[in-house]
Image (cartoon, coloured by chain):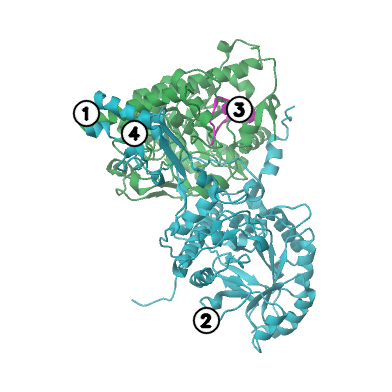
Chain colours: A green, B cyan
Amino acid sequence: MGNLELIVEKHTEKIHRGLEMLSTMRHGVPEGLGNKRWTGELILATYEQALTGDIPENGLEYKTGNSGGGFDVLDWKSHDGSAKVDEDRVDLSIPLNRRRDGKKIEIPLPIYGGGMSFGSISLNFMIARARAARKLGTYTSTGEGGYPDQIVPYRDHVITQVATGMFGVREETIQYAPIVEFKYAQGAKPGLGGHLLADKVTSEVAKMRESSMFTSLYSPFPFHSVYSVEDHKKHVDWIKTVNPRALISVKVSTPTDVDMVAIGSYYAGANIIHIDGGYGGTGAAPEIAKKNIAMPIEYAIPKVHDYLVSEGVRDNITLMASGGIRTADDVAKAIALGADGCVVGTAEAVAVGCTHCGNCERGRGCQIGITTTDPELSQFIDPDWGEKRIVNLFNAWSKRLRIILASFGLETIHDLRGRKDLLVRYM
Amino acid sequence: MQKTGYRRFKIESKPAPHVYPIPNKFDVSARKIRLAAMLAHEAFEYRFNKEVVLSRPCIYGVFGGRFGGFKPLKHKCVGCMRCVQEYPHIMTVKQSDSYKRLGDSFWTPENVFAVLNEASTGKIPVKGMGYKGAFSGEGFDGMWTDMSEIVRPTRDGVYGREYISTGVDIGRKPMSIDFVRIDDRPKTLEIPVPIIFDELPNGTENADVRVAVGLAAEKIGTFRIARDIRFGEPGLDNLLPIIDEGGIADYGEEQPEIVEFDAERPDLLKKLLARFDRSILIGRLPFKEDSGSIACELARQGVDGLHLYADYHGHDYSKDARHVSSALRDVHQQLVREELRDQVTIIASGGIALAEHVPKAIICGADLVAIDTTVLVALQAEFQGETRDRANCRLMSRRINPEWGAQRLVNLIGVWHDQLIEILSAMGMRDVRRLRGDTGRSMLDSELREQSFGAIPWAT
């Protein structure tokens, strides 16, 4: 074994062991870890769930962050704490196609993985996510960076994203897909398109995206062929022509008229409307966009849900929410506000060691191999190890969801949808 | 090739690194005995393979100094925490005390660093991962700007093809066509960005800072406000002087293009109107409970613009102080109701500290903003306490090279301009003038909370 391999092996082992040690709290919560949204405790609690597959029992706060608003000021209505139905019998599955026609797809938990593109994340992390999705019976999304060959074995669990840059969108990648996702906008940088910084455009990434090496890649905004619902319908028809079996998901951000956008998407033929709130994750985005443009997901969900109900189409479309979903409680609160399920990205990254430090775009990228294309750093994420941790995290979340549902006497996750009356607020 | 004379507006930034040291954001330290023990342990574990044993858990070079982890290079730390993840029993990383002490109760360390880095690099701050801060907050922090999902008249704002105008007019716009005076120029001046430099706080305006601000205003093509005119200094064409009775005489027979005056003195306005009938007169007055009525009265009397100022923390001078965003909305809406809005320009200042405050102030009703303490922060002034108002400033300017200072301010305005374009681009707007008072382009936390959470009972 050469020195480079030994060095990678050494640090991989240290990182993995360190993650296990940190969540034991033997050394407390590291002072510099976390922020208001992802507190140090929440990060450690996520490490713990990714390690054990269980709800933390060491006193770590695993339900909320400390942002002072949104999910963090919502709680569950008090109840006696006892389970009113058998937790094991609680059904967490949701259908992704609620229309009469088309393939029926159901996922066993109300969660699938959000788009994170090859180039913004390492191939190993991408494989880990795809394997976890297969194991859990759910999905993960390619993001807009193309469809690496190594992902093809998991294609029954991979959503192909068609975004404005059209990077890696080919006939076969559409034909692979059980679900095709149009990304109109992204919560972290709504209305601004995508941006992959030059350092990450390695030869592999450039080849996949058919671009020049080490040149920044911008995805324009919006789709330059879509300026109306009718144009969008033509896009849907294009995908349906290439792959008639695919379900269509439409990912949009959360402007004032997000409810109108949702209904337009429904009438254009979408099976899933995926709303991505302003505080969502990204590989790189202007700070001004993350904080200031478009509304947080907590406010957008009821707006869309209520409007779809009033239009009489709520039960014909699946509403997925993303953009700041950090915990099982966030998932349950999103559903109580009106979503069918949630799309998760950052929490999966935290499961494999992300500290939410925000240096993804800097130099070689993520120091522990998540959001990087650096060949050495990428090796820190072993796909088998990553798969286990993501599966464990969602198993722990499923347990927590079952506890919440059972405590209110609800037998299915669908019964929680729109049940604002089960929530209380502090602000 | 034939020259067309066309030049697309662009603010040229170039690096202007900090000349005074800034605090390290992070404090990295190792428990030295444990570190020594770990090195000894790894030496045996990796059979004294020096390259492997000494390979460090940092890709930013924090342990790349001669003494490795025993004397970390703290200035290189970006807070990634990998060293803590690998060696939680040895390493500690936390925000440094000197970083946490930066600023005052309004200027947070994050905001000070944002301005320092913008002035230094002239680049839009771009980072990975999602937003990390509080869900919302007071004033501008409780407001989100809208975006357009599909239908957009423009695209690729900062990087692209279609021009987004950030130009604004200062002065009174003609309300109708007057055929008798059809050859007269309207009493307006256009500047390319909706940002001007306000008069600096008392005691902070040393000669170098003054020259730097003048040069920057000249390079950008915007205004700087100052009380006295010093002939021979740069940027005189970009000066917006504040004048009183004494200053009127200095102009002799001439009329300045634009002047500011203390609008709380009605006698002064009469004299100015009589003497400077062709000048753009901007009344300077504090935001108070009755600012809306005063603004309407001044507009009727012939004032062409209002410079409404809040304190440096963005609060008005009402008995129950409000944030400048609320005060501004009130004044704007009253002028609209009384059909006077286009007869006056509103310049808002006080608490404009970040790029996002510019579009948000404009949404609340300003035509443009003036920045004050932000200028000093960009020029690496030193915080020595709370700086809330002009008379009691504890933000001390330092000796600087005026050329360096000018470039820092050009960088700052350049990067704010680019961020303004990002916001306009997301909305699909091609002209910042259209954003003025368009509160429908914003979403308020207080309103959304009631719409979305209103049915949820309060916790008991």
Name the spot of residue B424 as percent of width and height, x first: 55, 56
| Element type where label 2 sits in the image | loop
Q: What amino acid is labelled 3 in the image? A: Ile
Dots 1 and 4 on the same chain: no
Mark identifier at residue B232: 2
Task: Identify the chain of the residue marked 2, using the numbered disc in the image.
Answer: B
Name the spot of residue B421 as percent of width and height, x first: 52, 57
| Element type where label 4 sits in the image | helix
Q: What amino acid is labelled 1 in the image? A: Phe
Name the spot of residue B383 as percent of width and height, x first: 56, 55
Q: CA distance from mark 4 to mark 3?
A: 32 Å
Residue labelled with disc 1 = B48
| Element type where label 1 sits in the image | loop
| Element type where label 3 sits in the image | helix
Q: Are marks 1 and 3 in contact (CB under 8 Å)?
A: no
Q: Quadrant of the C terminus of chain A?
A: top right
Dots 1 and 2 on the same chain: yes
Local crowd size for mark 3, using a 10 Å CA cut-off: few (<14), some (14–19), many (≥20): many
Task: Identify the chain of the residue marked 3, using the numbered disc in the image.
Answer: A
Task: Identify the chain of the residue marked 4, using the numbered disc in the image.
Answer: A
Q: Residue at x 71, y 53 (%)?
A: B326
Q: In this view of the protein, which residue sits in the foreground, A229 or B8?
A: B8
- Nearer to us: label 3 or label 2: 2
Residue labelled with disc 3 = A335
Name the spot of residue A36 as percent of width and height, x first: 56, 37
Residues in magenta, as a range: A316-339
Q: CA distance from mark 1 to mark 4?
A: 33 Å
